[in-house]
Image (cartoon, rainbow, N blue to C red):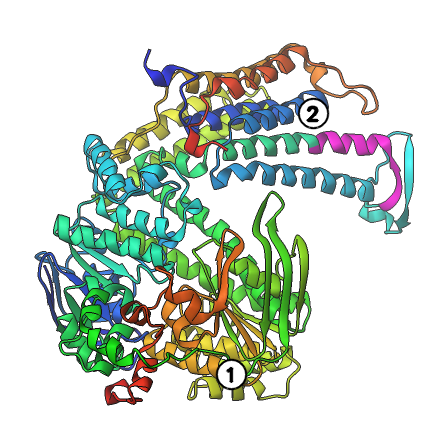
Amino acid sequence: MRPHHRVTHPRVLHPGAWWLWALGLAAAASRTQNPVPLLLIMAVTWFVVAARRGNTPWAASYALFFKIAMAVILIHLVFQALLSGHVQGLTVLFTLPEIPLPESTGIKIGGPVTLEALLTALYVALQLAAIFCCIGAANALGSARRLLRYVPSALYEIGIACVIALTFAPQLATDARRVRDASRLRGGTGGRVRRLGRLAMPVLEGALERSVELAAAMDSRGYGRTTSRSTGSRRVTVTLVLVGMMGICIGLYGLLNGTDSAWLGLPALLVGTVLAMGGMIVGGRRTGRTRYRPDPWATPELLVTGSGVVAAVSMFWQARVDPTSLLVASPTDLPAVPVVACLGILVAALPAVLAPPLPQGVAQ
Amino acid sequence: MITFERVSVTYDGADVPTLRDVDLHVPEGEMVLVMGRTGSGKSTLLRAINGLVPYFSGGTLRGRVVVDGRDTATHRPRDLADVVGFVGQDPMSGFVTDNVEDELAYGMESLGISAPVMRKRVEETLDLLGLADLRGRPLANLSGGQQQRVAIGSVLTTHPQILVLDEPTSALDPLAAEDVLATLRRLVHDLGMTVVLAEHRLERVVQFVDTIVHVPGNGSPVTQGDPASVLARTPIAPPIVELGRVAGWDPLPLTVRDARRRSVDLRTSLAAVPPPAHDAHALGDPVAEIWDLVAGYPRQPVLNGITLAVRTGEVVALMGRNGAGKSTLLRSLVGLHRPGSGRLETGPTGLVPQVPEDLLYAATVRAECATADKDAHAAAGTTRALLDRLAPGIDDGHHPRDLSEGQKLALALAVVLAGEPKLLLLDEPTRGLDYIAKRQLVVILRDLAVNGHGVLMATHDVELVAEVASRVAVLADGEIVADGAAPDVVVSSPAFAPQVAKIMAPQAWLTAADVAHALGRDGTDPRDE
């Protein structure tokens, strides 16, 4: 057996495998509001990230996404408490002072806050938080930049735009921190807003200079050199890819939405995929780029992707066979445990051992 | 290999051309230094070689630039990627990928080189530049010297015949700089590459180069010649050449080895003269005292128990390799970094950060000065008066970002001084400064010390330390490993000794001016002015 097929052989996993795995989990999360599988999904992402993240700057992004997820929950709860106009349930926890608004607006601010309303809000927010955790895990495990290497050459320009954006954002944050420190040294009067206005200029100017610098560096290293382009073939490529992508989006929407309209789901997905592939093949012919040491797609990649697919499929199967277990009938009841879906999600925790360990230099 | 024929470059909106009628010929296999004041058009010249000027900068280029038989009028930078490798000032801003290996391969991927060849060239380049241990490491985690070497490697993999570098060592500590320059030297001598580089710190590079191109700026003609003859005529020169002028050596020595051989007589004649002690003028009260300071991150302290005091009237230099904790110490002193433990007492303190632009927000110098007055609760006009003292003649209407590096530093210094700090902190003040701006900075710092300020500066610039510091503290791994009078600390150190000290060792002479003074030849050289 060649070494990259072994799960114990240290190497960096194909970032695409991590993204597919995470998307599988995210798809599973999108079909339920039951807190049991949702919490399980969050725990699984945490577990796998802790086991397999490297020392790249991206690896820290899971913590960031997790914080965003918590913020989402908090914001949701606060707004629910403030605006729970149509009172659900009877268990009043506390009563906020009410701001009287004309009846016609249909909005009530303040008033009694019930346990039921808060729990419903919590479950809805939990779904979003779980999806955030999945995306955070994908970012931390499979660097988005590495993934961009596998963007088909027809989409090369888009890929480059993404590279610049990916560089721009963290640099902007570093610059902002540096300039803010410097401005604190200078002291100064005026409110936050005025200070913000003052800081914006050096930060944006710096970022702009840097982007131009990056573009110059890319150009002088030969970027875009081998693309011989005729306008005609380029238009065909762009049209095919765009229409295909739209088809894929519609198809995915149809599938995830769970509505039974026949043309929305699988057919649209298939047609879209074919169109997009066609576009990429047409467009791929016109660039002469080569790829350095592409990550292999071997057994560990299949296993990791497969575990994500298992989680999604088991959730979808549960939704079809036993949809009630995925919904919370009454918020105050103990939520049911959807056994199949939970087992599927647990399978998605296996990459913590199925993904190959990282080599010494990049391990945490 | 590189030919400029009557090249003039005029940027959009500029009244006068930045470069005028430049004729230049660089043969194959030469190492060429482009020197000149900041803003004289060095970068423009370098960027014209691979067409970044005018394709990226805008403006008009007249004349012809031909590189390896390709005219930049018809070849864009990307079409020259296999002939010219260009490395910009800040390596980090030119990186496209995440880790070392991918970065080395990026250029080859763009050129469509086949996978086996790429594989081989990456391995060769990793070995050539001593990067093999770092191959999988994220670029952001590398030290400055390593990043610079990766940046050089990333353009080498396409096997260009010409390497163009814009200030490759300006951000590096002395040893990392030597590392990078040794690499370049190897490329020229072993692989026959043509290297063109711009650098302000002549003392670091002059000994390696075959030819100097002097760009005097303000429209004067660009000259080309061998190092000794060019340096004999230019107002900017490394200390070794200044010493040569003082001692009247001809031709001028360019390496410490040459100068040491010549200096036997000089050393004998000065053996009985005690070198100046570089003492502070009048030591006053302490303006900052630190006891057992620990700072950094909980599990990874950057400073491990620093005890240090700065008094008015002295200029203390803080040295040490990149990442030794110099910046953290300065930031702790102004309260930007919360100390983990230890005690810290400071008077009113001002810090000029590494990038002086960070302190400048307004659209004009006038507005900047007015805001600084208001921020510091000083009388209107205070900052402007300070600025006029530091760097006379800066136009009120200019945009701060359009000033030269030296002027930006002066403006940032004026803004900080408006708050009347007793302790002035400077982080790498000579980054990007030419010799003339540096000389002004030396005068300013001496003046501040005499007028009852304490100055603490973190710097890699050993020549600046030799000129102005009365005390030197060396940081390593978050601890102070040496703290004492400047001559005592730097003369014995292989990394931090200034050139004159290396030549005159074991006598503790630090600068050419000291030697001139001892010989009774103060301000001998009218070309200096």
Under circle 2, the secondary element is loop
Q: The N terminus of chain B appears in which quarter of the rendering?
A: bottom left
Q: Would residue B111 be counted in the magenta stretch?
A: no
Q: Classify residue B506 by image quadrant.
A: bottom left
Residue A306 located left or right of residue B49: right
Residue B216 can be seen, yes or no:
no
Residue at the spot 36% in from the left edge and 39% down from the top edge: B134
Q: Position of residue B67 (x, y in %)?
A: 12, 59
Badge 2 amino acid = Gln
Q: Main secondary structure of the magenta part?
A: helix
Mark nearest the camera among 1 and 2 is: 1
- The chain that hosts pointer 2 is A
Residue B40 located left or right of residue A22: left
Badge 1 amino acid = His
- The chain that hosts pointer 1 is B
Under circle 1, the secondary element is loop
Q: Position of residue B335 (x, y in %)?
A: 64, 63
Q: Which mark is residue A33?
A: 2
The span picked out in magenta is A109-125
Badge 2: how crowded within 10 Å, few (<14), some, or many (20+)? many
